[in-house]
Amino acid sequence: MTYIIEDETVPLLKIPGSSQNESSVNDIQDSKRGKIFVIESVTCNSIMERQNSESKIKTTAILSDKSKAWIDGMIPHIPQLNELDQLGKHNGITIHQEDHDSYVNRSNNTLKLMEREKMKIAVLCKSIAKPDLTFEEFKLLGCSSEGFVIDDIRRVLWPRLLGLSDEEPVPVEGLETVHTLLPDEIYQQILKDVARSSGHLSSRATEEEIEIFHEELTQLICWVLHRHTYLNYYQGYNDIAATVLIVMGLQSGLFVLERISLKFLERFMEKTMEKVNQELFYIFALLERIHPTLLEHLENVELFPHFALAEYTTWYAHKYAENRKLLHRLFDYFLGSPPLMPLYLSTVIVAYRATEIFDTTPDMGHTHKVLCTLPEDLPFEQLLVDATNLYRQYPPESISNDVRDYDNKRRCKEQEWKSKAEASRKERERQRQLRVAIPANRLPYRIRSYKTITVVTILAIGLYAFLKTSSGIN
């Protein structure tokens, strides 16, 4: 039996075959959370004027871990080893040999690693073919060592992992002009960030490939933002979108990025990052339990966990844009994990680097710089296992009170810094005013009249002679 839910969204672009007579939306309401979202960038009236139909995406029902992964009875087909192209073009982007370089054992273990990858692909093919595979087992396949291994398999399994139907998506039309439906200031910011996203491509990518990539990435981002007008664009969203585009291509990537945005990134796309700033303190709450000495060191240098903001909001896509193999592996892991899992990974990475942090000059600037610079040789497979175990040991609800306490301390500290800064500013202003001297009236020191100079000189000589004569008489 197939369970279908309809995700009601703001009408955007015409999808061939969609109804044109459905009623328009008056409010954007998230029925799952029971709240009304305020539309800032595009009003409902303008949307209804542009289009009177409402497009809907059919997705499989949200599955529990114990339910069957293939409730629609359609077992996805993933390519066998003999079907895989080692090199070639994917989604219009040339895949070069360096894109296949491993991020584990970069020395002489290439053959061994390739065998491990082949073994994992064999396990995937065997497991996916099971009709009674549970959704929990399905997610574990992506989270376990090597993940889904290659993009050919990810293109098949990522949509199913996100609850999308296995059916081929109907092509979306009008992507070339979707940017005109967004406020210009948002579109201009997207263009700037997209222009900086070329790091996701191979160094051998041609100018034509880069131009196509930028164009499709812009369309991908604008489409999702216009479908869900309560989502606010943030810098870093382009890195996640770029990863989706490279793996899925444009048409399939539209719906994959949409589901990722709604399921994992929604709190990043609120009006402010206040909720995200609080969530970052899960790192401190966890360090308090697994490495209290390191936490004390970070607090002594007055450092907050905002060094992990970019990794958290981009799923490491900004840092490891050029390491495509590692980045896509991390996406396998995050797509099969709870939304806060990137913070648990950040925690185990910080703990792993404890010695390096202790050896750094103990001040805020140097420590922050070290933590913002992630090494390329981190043992990620082991760190992912550690993050999973840490999540099981300390789930978010068990430490949420400590997180709020740390966030309150942050607010108090920021207020203290603001007060000190204001007091310092006032003191500098007072000192400046004390140093300002009031100029006094002075006689002009330049006398340009020769007659006056002559008279003054004669009087001076006469006075001098009189004084000399008087002293001689006496």
Image (cartoon, rainbow, N blue to C red):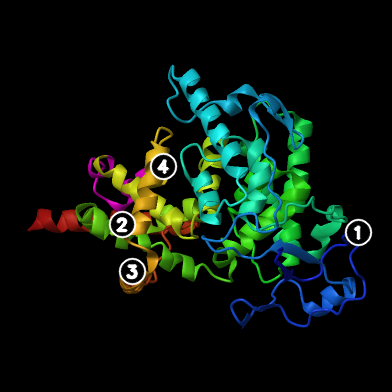
Q: Position of residue 144 (x, y in %)?
A: 47, 43
Quarter residue 30 falls in: bottom right
Q: Amino acid at mark 2?
A: Ala
Measured in 3D between alpha carbons, the distance from the residue under mark 2 to the one under mark 3, in whole angstroms, is 97 Å
Crowding at label 3, few (<14), some or many (≥20) Cα neighbours within 10 Å?
A: few
Q: Amino acid at mark 3?
A: Ser
Residue at numbered disc 3: 398
**Residue on which the image places disc 4:** 373
Q: Which residue is mark 1?
A: 16
Residue 366, magenta (yes or no): yes
Q: Quadrant of the N terminus?
A: bottom right
At mark 2, the secondary structure is helix
**Residue at horizontal 55 percent and vertical 67 percent from the top:** 267
Which corner quadrant of the image does residue 20 belong to?
bottom right
Cβ–Cβ below 8 Å for labels 2 and 3? no
Look at the numbered disc 1 and give the secondary structure of its residue: loop
Instruction: Point out the frontmost of discs 4 and 2.
Output: 4
Q: Is residue 104 left or right of residue 322?
A: left
Helix, strand or loop under label 4: loop
Q: What secondary structure characterizes most of the magenta part? A: helix
The answer for how far apart the CA atoms under marks 4 and 3 are is 30 Å
On the rendered structure, is 348 left or right of 45? left
Q: In this rendering, does residue 399 appear at all?
A: yes
Q: CA distance from mark 2 to mark 1?
A: 108 Å
Disc 2 versus disc 1: nearer the observer:
1
Magenta residues span 356-370
Q: Is residue 397 left or right of residue 318?
A: left
**Closer mark to the observer between disc 4 and disc 1:** 1
| Few, some or many residues within 10 Å of mark 1 (<14, 14–19, 20+) | few
Is any part of residue 432 visible from this angle?
no
